[in-house]
Image: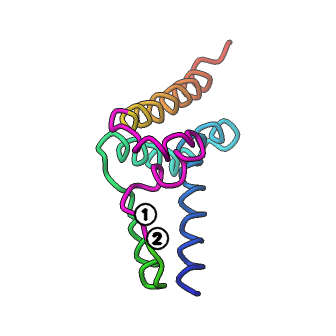
Amino acid sequence: MLYRILADAVVGLHFLFVLFVVFGGFLTFRWPRLAWVHVPSFLWGGGIELAGWVCPLTYLENDLRAQGAAAGYADSFVEHYVLPLLYPELLFTGGFPRTGFIWIGIFVLLLNGLIYGRLWWSRYHKPS
């Protein structure tokens, strides 16, 4: 029971981290110092998707589930939890293509690059 609760807590933490990776740049307009945490986070998240790696939190969750005598999963967190929310038909078609993950990584990096470009521009190009 404890391992299941811990595994579920890891899922919640992982989901919040994914949201922070994608949208956390918007928070830096209000709290600019947050960029010190967000920049490495979005680079990590985008890099994981581009490289096809699996986040260590996924391994931790699966290990906790195994210790609690529950089944884990072989795919990534995004593929297992996030994509079925966005694309339920993927459950029946055999999965998400590798190029899709590359596009997710590019989207994360471009979105946050635009956010930080805008933040930089507004900070250093104020009207006189």
- The one nearer the camera, 69 or 3, is 69
Structural distance between the alpha carbons of marks 2 and 1: 5 Å
Which residue ends up furthest to the front in the rendered image?
A: 92
User: Vertically, is 36 above or below 109?
Assistant: below
**Number of numbered discs:** 2
**Residue 29: % across, % down:** 66, 35
Which residue corresponds to mark 1?
A: 58
Q: Is residue 127 magenta?
A: no
Say what amino acid the circle numbered 1 marks: Thr
The magenta segment is 72-99
The residue identified by callout 2 is 61
Between 73 and 121, the one lying in front of the other is 73
Q: Which mark is residue 22?
A: none
Tell me the quarter of the picture where residue 103 sits: top left
Tell me the SS state at disc 1.
Answer: helix
Q: Is residue 37 left or right of residue 54?
A: right
> Which quarter of the rendering shows the N terminus?
bottom right
Q: Residue at x 46, y 84 (%)?
A: 69
Image coordinates for residue 105, horizontal then vertical, percent: 41, 37
Q: Please provide percent x and percent y for residue 68.
A: 49, 84
Instruction: Look at 56% across and 29% down and name the residue there.
Output: 115
Is label 2 in contact with label 1 (beta carbons under 8 Å)?
yes
The residue most toward the left is 51
**Residue at 53% across / 60% down in the picture?**
14
Left or right of 73? Residue 29 is right
